[in-house]
C-alpha cells in the first residue's frame, strides 16, 4: 500500500515493516467464537505474576495521578545490589527492547554498521534500519551465532554488535569461552550488546553471566528483562548494565518516565521473589521435557533450546499448520519472518497447555 508521506520520512523507514507480535487471545476468540484458547506464541510466563507482585500493584493504584520516579531510584539500587555494580551503570527501559532502541539511537546512524546473526531477534534489524545504519547479517552456524564470522564482519564502520544469548527464536546459546574470546578480540571502539532476556532459564555450567565482566570490558552492554522468567511482560520493564560512560549516553536519550510506577514497584518485588522464580524455572524445565518427548514420538526434529520456548522443524509450510492450530484454539508462532518458513516456535506453558498443544499439533499434521 502506498504512503504519500513516505518521501518525508528518514531513509531507513521505507524498508521497515511493523513488528508483528503473537496473535492476542481475545482476537482469536472473537474470530472463532470460542472462549478456551491458549496462547503459546510470545514466550510469556504461564504462571502469571506472583502473589507478591499482585499485592504491591494494588497498593500503587491510589498514586496513579502522580508521575513515576523518573530515575527509578529504588529499582536501580536493588539491581545494583543484585549485580554488584554501581547504580550509575544501570539504564532502565520500557522493556529491554526500549534499551536496544536507545543503543541504536546513541551509537548508530547513516554511514555506520551493526553486526548481528542470521535468525537473531527481529528488533536488531528494526532499530538498525530505523536510524539509517547498515545491517551486516552473518550466516548462522547450526541455527546459532557464528562468533568468528561476526568478528570477521566487523569493520572500521562497525559501531554495534548484537549478540543474543540465548537466542530468540532458535533457543541456541554460546558458552563463556566463546563469548570471552570475542570480547577480547573485538575493537574496544565497538559496543558489544549481549542480550540476555532468557538468562534466568539457562542451566548450563559454561553459560556466562556477562554482567560480571563489566569491569573488564568497558564496551560491553548487557540487557535483561522482567518480561520472561519474572512474569510481568505486560508492565514492560527491562534494563541494561554497562560502563557508567555508556549508561550516561543512553540516559541522555531515554524518554522521561519511560518506566511507569507500577512497573517499578512490581519489578522490585519480583526481583526479590526467589521462590516464584524457582517455580517458574521448574515449570519451564518440565515443559521442555514434555515437548521433547512428544516430538521424538512424533518423529519431529527440533532445535535444542535453553529458553522458555522450543522451535520445531515441521518439514512443511509452518503457516498452514499454524492455521490448523488456530482453528483448535492454540496460538503458536510461525517464524517465516526470520527466514525459517518450515519452523514453528512454541512457548512453554503449563503442563495441561503443553499437552493440548501437542494433541492439536498431532491433529494438524
Image (tube, helix red, strand yellow):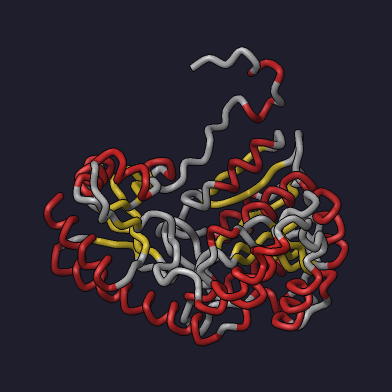
Judging depth in this view, the residue of 16 and 296 nearest the camera is 16
Q: How many marks?
A: 0
From this viewpoint, is residue 151 visible? no
Image quadrant where residue 194 sits: bottom right
From this viewpoint, is residue 125 visible? yes
Horizontal arrangement in the rendering, residue 233 relative to residue 258 (left or right): left
Horizontal arrangement in the rendering, residue 72 relative to residue 331 (left or right): right
Q: How far from the left and from the top, in percent, is residue 69?
A: 80, 63
Q: How far from the left and from the top, in percent, is residue 316?
A: 21, 44
Judging depth in this view, the residue of 133 and 156 nearest the camera is 133
Q: How far from the left and from the top, in percent, is residue 154?
A: 68, 50
Residue drawn at the location 46% of the way across and 60% of the way down: 144
On screen, residue 35 above or below 164: above
Residue drawn at the location 51% of the way across and 52% of the way down: 120
Judging depth in this view, the residue of 338 and 151 nearest the camera is 338
Residue drawn at the location 82% of the way across and 63% of the way down: 71
On screen, residue 100 above or below 54: above
Q: How far from the left and from the top, in percent, is residue 159?
A: 75, 49
Amino acid at each position: 500500500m502506498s504512503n504519500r508521506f513516505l518521501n518525508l520520512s528518514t531513509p531507513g523507514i521505507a524498508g521497515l515493516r511493523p513488528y508483528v507480535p503473537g496473535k492476542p487471545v481475545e482476537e482469536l476468540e472473537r474470530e472463532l467464537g470460542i472462549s478456551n484458547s491458549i496462547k503459546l506464541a510470545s514466550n510469556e510466563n504461564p504462571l502469571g505474576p506472583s502473589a507478591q507482585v499482585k499485592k504491591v500493584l494494588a497498593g500503587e493504584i491510589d498514586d496513579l495521578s502522580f508521575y513515576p520516579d523518573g530515575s527509578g531510584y529504588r529499582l536501580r539500587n536493588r539491581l545494583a545490589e543484585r549485580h554488584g555494580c554501581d547504580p550509575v551503570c544501570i539504564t532502565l527501559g520500557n522493556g529491554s527492547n526500549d534499551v536496544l532502541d536507545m543503543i541504536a539511537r546513541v551509537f548508530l546512524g547513516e554511514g555506520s554498521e551493526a553486526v548481528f546473526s542470521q535468525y537473531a531477534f527481529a528488533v536488531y534489524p528494526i532499530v538498525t534500519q530505523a536510524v539509517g545504519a547498515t545491517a551486516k547479517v552473518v550466516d548462522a552456524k547450526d541455527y546459532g551465532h557464528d562468533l568468528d564470522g561476526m568478528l570477521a564482519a566487523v569493520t572500521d564502520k562497525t559501531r554495534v554488535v548484537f549478540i543474543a544469548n540465548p537466542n530468540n527464536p532458535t533457543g541456541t546459546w554460546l558458552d563463556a569461552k566463546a563469548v570471552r574470546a570475542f570480547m577480547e578480540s573485538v575493537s574496544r571502539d565497538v559496543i558489544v550488546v549481549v542480550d540476555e532476556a532468557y538468562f534466568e532459564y539457562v542451566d548450563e555450567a559454561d553459560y556466562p553471566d556477562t554482567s560480571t565482566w563489566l569491569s573488564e570490558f568497558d564496551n560491553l552492554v548487557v540487557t535483561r528483562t522482567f518480561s520472561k522468567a519474572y512474569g510481568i511482560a505486560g508492565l514492560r520493564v527491562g534494563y541494561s548494565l554497562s560502563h557508567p560512560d555508556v549508561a550516561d549516553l543512553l540516559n541522555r536519550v531515554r524518554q522521561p518516565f519511560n518506566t511507569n510506577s507500577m512497573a517499578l514497584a512490581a519489578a522490585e518485588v519480583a526481583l526479590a521473589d526467589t521462590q516464584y522464580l524457582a517455580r517458574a524455572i521448574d515449570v519451564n524445565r518440565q515443559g521442555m521435557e514434555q515437548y521433547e518427548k512428544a516430538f521424538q514420538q512424533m518423529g519431529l526434529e527440533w532445535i535444542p533450546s535453553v529458553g522458555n520456548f522450543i522451535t520445531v522443524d515441521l518439514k512443511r509450510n509452518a503457516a498452514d499448520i499454524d492455521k490448523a492450530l488456530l482453528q483448535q484454539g492454540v496460538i503458536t508462532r510461525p517464524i517465516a519472518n526470520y527466514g525459517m518458513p518450515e519452523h514453528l516456535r512454541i512457548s512453554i506453558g503449563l503442563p495441561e497447555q503443553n499437552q493440548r498443544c501437542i494433541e492439536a499439533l498431532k491433529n494438524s499434521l
